[in-house]
Amino acid sequence: MEDLVLASLDSAVFDVDNLIENIAYKSTDGNVINENFDPYVLEGKFRQAMSILQDCQVQTEQNIKHLEEACEKERNTWANSVAQLEELYQSTYTGQQELEMRISVISTKVIQIGHQLESKSNPRQQLVDARTTAKYLERFLDANDDVSLMFQDASKLEQAAHIIHQLYNVLQELPDEAKFTDAKNKVKERYMAIEEDLLLEFSRAQVRNDKKAMKKYIKLLSKFKGHNDCIQNFITDCLKGYFDNPNIDIFNSIPQLFVKVSELINELFDQPEKVTERLIITVYMEKLAPYVRDQLEPYLRDPGLENMEKYLQTLYTLHKKATKLSHDLQTQKISDDPAFLHKLNQYVFKTYLKTYSEYELSCLEEKFQVHLERLELTGGQRRMKPTGLSITDIIQQRLLNTDQVDESRFSPDLAAALLNDCRTAMTRITTLSEGTEASENILQCFRRLLNALGSQHIDTELQYSLQAIPGPEPKQEPDIRFFQAILQTNNSIQLIERYFVMDIAPLLLGTQQQTVLLQSKEKVFGQLEELINVGVDKSLSCIIGYARNILNEQKRSDFKPESDLSIYECSPICKRVVRSIDTQITRLEQNVDGKNLIGILNEFGLRFHRLIIDHVFKFEYNISG
């Protein structure tokens, strides 16, 4: 029984109900419903189990009490240790403050002593330097003393540089008298020689990549006039052979060069920003500018249309790459002047940007004319106006070569080509032009598009189509192609309008050129609309005239039959008129839509109604008719 109870207590989850069931089962061997069942035996087992549980409870409470006493003892021990540590920390902190105060006092005294020593040492050093300088000055002033071999020892170049620099400064303060002239010349000669030796040693150190020696000679040369030559020699050596490969991409190589050299510049020079600026200036003027010139000049030697287009596209590409290069360099904080790299870009491209607008607009106009001439050649008739002929003469000559105007004269390909050329030019203009010049170039560019596509192509084709409309009284059913001309004109106008709204208007927003361009556009569109109105009027007159000729074939007595039989069928004349009208309306609906279609049909309906009314009143009728 004890094992059973202890096993239940040791389990992860103590289940009282399960323990009771187990005790009852063990006590009766599972025969609870047997006649020989003895409840007193079961009661004894339960009492025994309860006694075991009570003993376990007493033992557990004693264990808990011992553990609590041990924890309390350990807590007191650690509390005493913490109190001792706090006391030790406070003592240590107080000692540290005392030490800091003593160190501060000692440092102040050391600094004061250093200043006192310096105030004593500097005059002494200056006196020694002055004595040395005076000794050498005496030799230079002595006309009989040969100083040509003085300072020839290469191992003492640093000392010689220091002395000759002081001699040079002293002699500059002396008056220009004859007794000092010879000495000044001798010192200047040795000054130049030592300066040249320092530059040479610096170059040798740079070849050896001896940074320590380079820094030493830079410091020595900082007192000489040749310090700028030292910087230039350093830059020249850095660039030597770097851009000699003809296949190298100069725009990618310049940032790489800067990353490679900038760390060395920061390590060697006291003012690295100035050296870096000079390096970039040298690269732009001596490397980038000649590269741009070599890329562009060949196209200018033979300024044909093809070469001009290549020239403009190359200029655009180079300028775009140069702008990106400047942006990349600016992110590395090369100069405090935000306009520094922009000015260098302007220097590189200023010669070409000065004439860019003229070349761009001239090339664009020439390309437009080439497209127009090519269209005329494929149509069998040149658009170029012969000398002494007006546009009316050209139209009449063209009409002699064709019975009806061909709708293929309106070329969607031409409109697409002109718009594509215009977009290309606009892309270059927005990159290569700035401010008012860019707005003016955009204005002139779009005006040329309006002139080529609107005035020279659509206007002329509308006039050809207008002249090809038959007269007002045709004898045969007219094949009016003018409605197709209206469709092609509307399509072209929509292309121009969409291009203007999407691409041009945002670039000119709020400028004077926007107003001028709107006026130019409305003027061209107004002229085209006027031609369309004239053509529609002439086309409707032709259609009505043909219907009138058909109706005139009808006799006045057709509706006055001699018999009393009623007439129920359409006359042949009526069928011909209806068939002709249906054909023309179908053609009109295929080429015109929206309000334009409604307006034309209204006008056509009025004229046709007037024609029918006039025709009906001419007949004689009886009851059968």
Image (cartoon, rainbow, N blue to C red):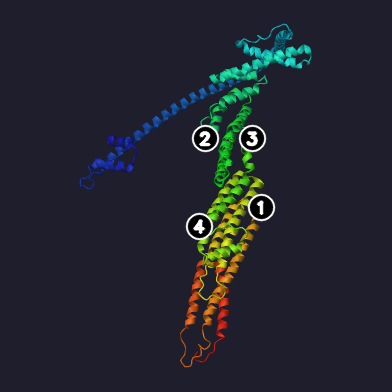
Mark found first going from the N terminus, 3 or 4? 3
| Type of amino acid under label 4 | Thr
210, 454: nearer the viewer: 454
Q: Residues within 10 Å of mark 1 (few under 14, many from 20)?
A: some
| Cα distance in 3D space between marks 1 and 3 | 31 Å
The residue tagged 1 is 513
Left or right relative to 438: residue 414: left
Mark found first going from the N terminus, 4 or 1? 4
The residue tagged 2 is 249
Q: Is residue 245 above or below residue 538?
A: above
The spot of residue 3 in percent (x, y) is 28, 34
The residue tagged 4 is 378
Between label 4 and label 1, give the one nearer the viewer. Answer: 4
| Cα distance in 3D space between marks 4 and 1 | 37 Å
The answer to whether marks 1 and 3 mark residues whose Cβ atoms lie closer than 8 Å is: no
The spot of residue 231 in percent (x, y) is 62, 24
Q: Residues within 10 Å of mark 4 (few under 14, many from 20)?
A: few
Quadrant location, the N terminus: top left
Mark found first going from the N terminus, 3 or 2? 2
Between label 2 and label 4, give the one nearer the viewer. Answer: 4
* Residue ID at (76%, 12%): 180
| Cα distance in 3D space between marks 2 and 1 | 40 Å
* Residue ID at (65%, 22%): 227
Secondary structure, mark 1, is helix
Between label 1 and label 3, give the one nearer the viewer. Answer: 1
Between label 3 and label 2, give the one nearer the viewer. Answer: 2
90, 130: nearer the viewer: 130
